[in-house]
Image (cartoon, rainbow, N blue to C red):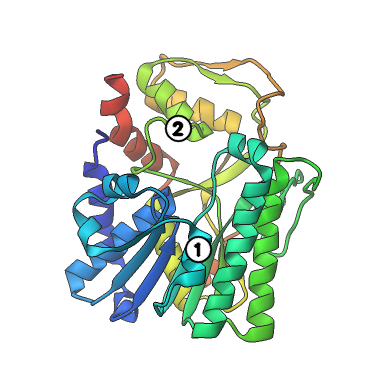
């Protein structure tokens, strides 16, 4: 099994430092995507706050796979309200009242976007519409839609990007089912806020990782980490020009809670550690230099693997910082903690 010690340390540190916990007292919170990375760590952080401060929080998680939920939540599973089934059916049939909603449910793998563009787009948009209708009818106190930096599309000028910038997305590229779905969902969130007064906010997450990400995850950062652990070369199948900042998992969770509790209705917030901005190629060299000098960077270009178009996204997070949020973990700390969390499993394979 994956070593969970570092994740437990992260959650412990979160509980000690998060100062807005009283605003969560006595609330019922709905978290979709609860077995995914962001949703699961959010739930674990909320449960840890609840236990530490006796807040009386209730958490409901609709999931597709009960066994996966057991595995993800382990000893806290019994403290959650877990609904097993289709998310859309759950939203249509739930009779519960929720104070807060975090809509984290989303596919995250490029190959899935390409193979299942209809399902990718529909999950982003239709589930969001149903949750917004629920929030309007039940007067939900606050709702955070978890979006992605991919909604910015392709931008190449490397000027800092605030929440008003937009780049190009080809609507006739099947991989755009993800980024266009995120844009459409953001639009309907803003519309429900302005027309119906729904207290919905948008969190645009950059690449977020840390303990809790599977050792077998296929995203670039995880592939690179495995190569470093095994002393293997990092092979780049693109030019590695695409650039973005990163965010550590518990920094992201803190950001989501700040947006929930202090954010402006109808507004979007970039969520990233601006200081971690680098290209994929720079990241590869950074990891080899700092974590395993036996690993080298090798270029083997292949344009047929479904990677996102080249884009450069130096996200500006001033709006989020105005709420009082600050990231705690830099790029070295992020990878040191992630690599440590998966190294036992990876080395034993």
Q: Residue 89 carries which label?
A: 1
Q: Which residue is drawn at 70% across and 40% down?
A: 175
Q: In this view, does 178 lie to the left or right of 50?
A: right
Disc nearer the start of the sequence (2/1)? 1
Q: Residue at x 60, y 44 (%)?
A: 244
Q: In this view, does 35 lie to the left or right of 77?
A: right
Q: Residue 265 carries which label?
A: none
Q: Residue at x 71, y 65 (%)?
A: 164
Regarding residue 315, the answer to whether it shows in the image is no
| Label 2 neighbour load within 10 Å: few <14, some 14-19, many 20+ | many
Are the residues tagged 2 and 1 within 8 Å (C-beta)? Answer: no
Q: Is residue 27 above or below residue 233?
A: below
Q: Quadrant of the C terminus?
A: top left
**Circle 2 sits in a helix, a strand or a loop, which is it?**
helix
The residue labelled by disc 2 is: 222
Q: Which residue is drawn at 65% across and 26% down?
A: 305
């Amino acid at each position: 099994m994956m070593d969970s010690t570092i994740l437990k340390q992260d959650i412990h540190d979160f509980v000690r430092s998060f100062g807005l916990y009283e605003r969560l007292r006595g609330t019922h919170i709905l978290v979709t995507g609860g077995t995914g990375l962001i949703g699961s760590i959010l739930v674990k952080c909320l449960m840890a706050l609840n236990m530490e401060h006796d807040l009386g929080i209730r958490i409901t998680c609709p999931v597709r796979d009960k066994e996966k939920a057991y595995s993800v939540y382990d000893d806290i599973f019994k403290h959650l309200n877990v609904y097993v089934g289709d998310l859309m059916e759950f939203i249509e049939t739930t009779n519960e009242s929720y104070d807060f909603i975090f809509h984290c449910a989303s596919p995250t793998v490029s190959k899935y976007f390409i193979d299942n563009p209809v399902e990718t787009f529909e999950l982003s948009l239709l589930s969001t519409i149903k949750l917004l209708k629920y929030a309007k009818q039940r007067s939900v106190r606050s709702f955070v839609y978890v979006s992605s930096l991919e909604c910015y599309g392709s931008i190449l000028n490397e000027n800092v990007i605030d929440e008003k910038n937009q780049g190009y997305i080809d609507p006739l590229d099947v991989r755009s089912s993800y980024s266009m779905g995120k844009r459409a969902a953001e639009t309907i969130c803003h519309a429900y806020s302005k027309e119906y007064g729904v207290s919905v906010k948008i969190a645009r997450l950059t690449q977020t990782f840390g303990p809790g990400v599977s050792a077998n995850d296929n995203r670039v950062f995880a592939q690179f980490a495995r190569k470093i652990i095994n002393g293997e070369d990092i092979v780049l199948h693109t030019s590695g020009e695409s650039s973005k900042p990163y965010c550590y998992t518990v920094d992201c969770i803190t950001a989501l809670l700040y947006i929930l509790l202090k954010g402006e209705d109808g507004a979007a917030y970039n969520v990233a550690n601006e200081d971690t901005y680098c290209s994929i190629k720079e990241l590869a060299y950074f990891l080899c230099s700092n974590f395993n000098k036996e690993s080298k960077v090798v270029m083997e270009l292949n344009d047929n693997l479904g990677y996102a178009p080249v884009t450069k996204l130096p996200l500006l997070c001033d709006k989020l910082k105005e709420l009082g949020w600050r990231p705690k973990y830099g790029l070295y700390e992020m990878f040191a903690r992630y690599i440590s969390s998966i190294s036992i499993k990876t080395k034993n394979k």
